Image (cartoon, coloured by chain):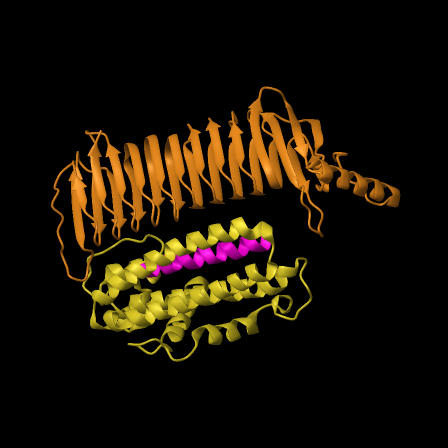
Chain colours: A yellow, B orange
C-alpha cells in the first residue's frame, strides 16, 4: 500500500467500513510509515474532539473556554498572559489571544469538518480547499448537526471579535479611526451575508449547500478577524 | 550606507530651538517638511523594499542603474533609512516610538531600474507604481494601490482602498476588504478577492482564475484558455461573464436564490434536490475544455457572448 491509497481509505478505516484484509493493509502501512500514522492519529484526535459536541443543539459546554485552556497549556511560556512584556504594548494583550483564537478556531473548524465528512455521506463534507456547491441530499444527522456547527463557529467569531474590539478600544488612537471603520465595514458585510445564509438555512434545514456556504462565510469572517488582529499588531 | 536625513534630539539647545520652530510653524499653520534628494547605485534587477506609515509612495522605473529618492518627509519623521547593497536596497521611513506626532507624512517619489523587483509595505498611504518590469509586491492598510506597465507579476493588497492594475502581467493577485478591484489587460493566472467591493477584470487569454466577493459584483471579460480552471464566487453580488462566442468550456453554475441568464446554451436551470442549491445549471459548449465554476447565494449569474 502506498501513501495515496492509505489516505484514500483513511476515512473508511476510522469509520470501521473496511474489510478485514483492507484494515490489515492499512494497519501494516501505518506501522511502517510515520507520516501516515500521524495523519491517522490527527484524524482520530479531531474526531474525538468533535464527538464531545452534543448533536441537535448548541453545546452546553463552552468550547472556546475548554479549547483555550487546552491550548494555553500547550502555548510557549512567553506567549501566555502575564509573561514578559512584548515590544509593543498592545501585543501584550493581543499576541496570546491571537494564537489561542486562531488555533481554537482552526481546531473546531477542522474537527467539525472532519465530523461531518465522517458521519455524513462523503459528498457532504465541507471542502474548504475547493469550495463547491453540491446537490447532495442531507442525511438526518447532517440536518441535526447544522445548528451545532453554526453555533460553534458563531461562538469562535464572537470570541475573536470581542478580542479585536477590546484591543482597538484600548488603543484609543485617533489614527486607528480609518482602520477601525474599514474593518468594521468589512465585517458587517460578512455578517450580513452570514445572517442571510443562516436565515435561509433555518427555512431549509439540512440543506448541505447552505451549510457549506454558511461555514465558508464564518471561515471568511474568522480569517478577516485574524487578519485584523495581525494588522493591529503590526501598525 | 544610511541616509543622513535624521532628527537629532540630544542637544537641549537644539530641542528648544526646534520646539520654538514648531510653535512658529503651528502659528503659521503648518509644520516644516524636509526635502529629500538621495541617489544610490543599483543593479538592473535590484530588489528594492520600501516601508512607510503615512504619506504617499510613487515608484517609477527608469533606464538608469540607480535608485533616486526625492520628495519630502514630515518634521516628526525620525529618520529616512536608505541602506543596503546595489542588489538589495531598503528604503524605510522610521517614526519615533513614543509620543503623539502630528507630522509624520513622507511623500516619496522613488525611481528604480526598470527591471527591479519592488516591494512596498505601507499603512496610511496610497501606492503608485509605473514602468517596472520586475516582480511587484504591494501592501497597504489604508490607501489605493495603482500599478501600470508590464511587471512580471503583481501581488497587491489593501484593507481600505481601490486596487487598480493596468498591467500586462501573466500572474496577478489582488485582495482588498473595502474597495473595488480593477484588473485591466491582465492574462494568465489571475486571482482577486474582496469583501465589500466589486471586481472588474478584462484582458486574456486567461489560464486560471479565482474571483471572490461577498457583496460586490464580478464583471469578467476575456478569453479562457483550454484546460484552464476558473472559479467565481459571490454572495449577494452578481457574476457577469462576457466571453468569446467560440468558447470551449464546461460550466457548473449554482445559486441559491439568484437568477441564471445564459447566452451560451441551456437557460433553464433546474433544482435537482430540495437539499441542494436553489438553481443549478451544468452544460458544455465548444467541446468543453476550460472548466468554469460559478456559485452565488442571492446574486444573479449572467453569461454574455462577446
Q: Is residue A205 above or below residue B241?
A: below
Q: Quadrant of residue B223?
A: top left
Residue at position x 81%, y 41% in the image = B20
Which residue occupies 31% across, 48% down?
B234
User: What is the span of residues highlighted in magenta in the rendered image?
Assistant: A214-235
Magenta segment, principal secondary structure? helix
Marker count (numbered): 0
* A131 with respect to A171 (left or right): left
Query: In the picture provided, is B112 more to the left or to the right than A1?
Result: right
| In this rendering, position of residue A231 left or right of residue B244 | right
Q: Is residue B152 above or below residue B291?
A: above
Magenta run includes residue A162: no
Q: Position of residue A229 (x, y in %)?
A: 53, 57
Where B280 falls versus A169 (above or below)?
above
Q: Which quadrant: the N terminus of chain A?
A: bottom left
Q: Measuring 62% from the left and 33% from the top, which residue is drawn there?
A: B107
Give A167 or A103, whichever is nearer the viewer: A167
Task: Examine the image and state in which quarter residue B90 appears.
Answer: top right
Q: Is residue A235 visible?
A: no
Asked if residue B275 is positioned above or below residue B151 in the image, the reply reads below
Q: Position of residue A57 (x, y in %)?
A: 31, 76
- The quadrant in which residue A167 appears is bottom right
Q: Is residue B68 left or right of residue B4?
A: left
Compare residues A127 and B19 and report the one nearer the observer.
B19
Task: Check if residue A218 falls in the magenta segment.
Answer: yes
x, y percent for residue B287:
17, 36
Q: Position of residue A222 (x, y in %)?
A: 43, 59
| Residue B35 appears in the figure | yes
Q: Nearer the viewer, residue B26 or A51?
A: B26
Amino acid at each position: 500500500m502506498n501513501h495515496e491509497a492509505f489516505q484514500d481509505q483513511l476515512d473508511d478505516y476510522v469509520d470501521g467500513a473496511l474489510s478485514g484484509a483492507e484494515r490489515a493493509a492499512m494497519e501494516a502501512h501505518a506501522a511502517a510509515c510515520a507520516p501516515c500514522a500521524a495523519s491517522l492519529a490527527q484524524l482520530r484526535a479531531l474526531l474525538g474532539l468533535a464527538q464531545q459536541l452534543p448533536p441537535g443543539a448548541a453545546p452546553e459546554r463552552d468550547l472556546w473556554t475548554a479549547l483555550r485552556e487546552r491550548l494555553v497549556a500547550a502555548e510557549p511560556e512567553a506567549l501566555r498572559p502575564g509573561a514578559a512584556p512584548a515590544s509593543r504594548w498592545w501585543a501584550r494583550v493581543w499576541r496570546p489571544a491571537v494564537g489561542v483564537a486562531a488555533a481554537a478556531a482552526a481546531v473546531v473548524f477542522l474537527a467539525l469538518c472532519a465530523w461531518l465528512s465522517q458521519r455524513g455521506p462523503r459528498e457532504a463534507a465541507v471542502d474548504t480547499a475547493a469550495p463547491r456547491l453540491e446537490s447532495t441530499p442531507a442525511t438526518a444527522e447532517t440536518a441535526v448537526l447544522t445548528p451545532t456547527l453554526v453555533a460553534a463557529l458563531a461562538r469562535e467569531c464572537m470570541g475573536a471579535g470581542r478580542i479585536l474590539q477590546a484591543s482597538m478600544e484600548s488603543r484609543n488612537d485617533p489614527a486607528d479611526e480609518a482602520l477601525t471603520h474599514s474593518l468594521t465595514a468589512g465585517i458587517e458585510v460578512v455578517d450580513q451575508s452570514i445572517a442571510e445564509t443562516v436565515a435561509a438555512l433555518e427555512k431549509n434545514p439540512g440543506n448541505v449547500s447552505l451549510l457549506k456556504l454558511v461555514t465558508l462565510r464564518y471561515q471568511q469572517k474568522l480569517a478577516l478577524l485574524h487578519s485584523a488582529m495581525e494588522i493591529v499588531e503590526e501598525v | 550606507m544610511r541616509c543622513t536625513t535624521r532628527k537629532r534630539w540630544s542637544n537641549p539647545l537644539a530641542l528648544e530651538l526646534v520646539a520654538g520652530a514648531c510653535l512658529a510653524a503651528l502659528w503659521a499653520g503648518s509644520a516644516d517638511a524636509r526635502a529629500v534628494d538621495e541617489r544610490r547605485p543599483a543593479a538592473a534587477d535590484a530588489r528594492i523594499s520600501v516601508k512607510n506609515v503615512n504619506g504617499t509612495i510613487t515608484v517609477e522605473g527608469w533606464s538608469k542603474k540607480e535608485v533616486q529618492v526625492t520628495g519630502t518627509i514630515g518634521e516628526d519623521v525620525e529618520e529616512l533609512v536608505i541602506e543596503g547593497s546595489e542588489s538589495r536596497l531598503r528604503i524605510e521611513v522610521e517614526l519615533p516610538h513614543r509620543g503623539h506626532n502630528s507630522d509624520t507624512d513622507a511623500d516619496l517619489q522613488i525611481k528604480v531600474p526598470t527591471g527591479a523587483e519592488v516591494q512596498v509595505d505601507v499603512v496610511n498611504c496610497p501606492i503608485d507604481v509605473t514602468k517596472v518590469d520586475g516582480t511587484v509586491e504591494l501592501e497597504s492598510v489604508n490607501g489605493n494601490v495603482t500599478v501600470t506597465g508590464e511587471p512580471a507579476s503583481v501581488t497587491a493588497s489593501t484593507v481600505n482602498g481601490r486596487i487598480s492594475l493596468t498591467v500586462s502581467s501573466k500572474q496577478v493577485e489582488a485582495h482588498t476588504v473595502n474597495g473595488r478591484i480593477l484588473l485591466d489587460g491582465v492574462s494568465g493566472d489571475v486571482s482577486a478577492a474582496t469583501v465589500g467591493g466589486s471586481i472588474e477584470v478584462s484582458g486574456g487569454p486567461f489560464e486560471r482564475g479565482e474571483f471572490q466577493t461577498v457583496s460586490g459584483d464580478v464583471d469578467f471579460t476575456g478569453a479562457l484558455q483550454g484546460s484552464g480552471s476558473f472559479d467565481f464566487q459571490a454572495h449577494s453580488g452578481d457574476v457577469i461573464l462576457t466571453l468569446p462566442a467560440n468558447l470551449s468550456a464546461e460550466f457548473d453554475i449554482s445559486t441559491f436564490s439568484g437568477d441564471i441568464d445564459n447566452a451560451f446554451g441551456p437557460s433553464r436551470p433546474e433544482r435537482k434536490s430540495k437539499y441542494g442549491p436553489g438553481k443549478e445549471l451544468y452544460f458544455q459548449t465548444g467541446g468543453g475544455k476550460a472548466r468554469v465554476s460559478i456559485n452565488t447565494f442571492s446574486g444573479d449569474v449572467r453569461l454574455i457572448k462577446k
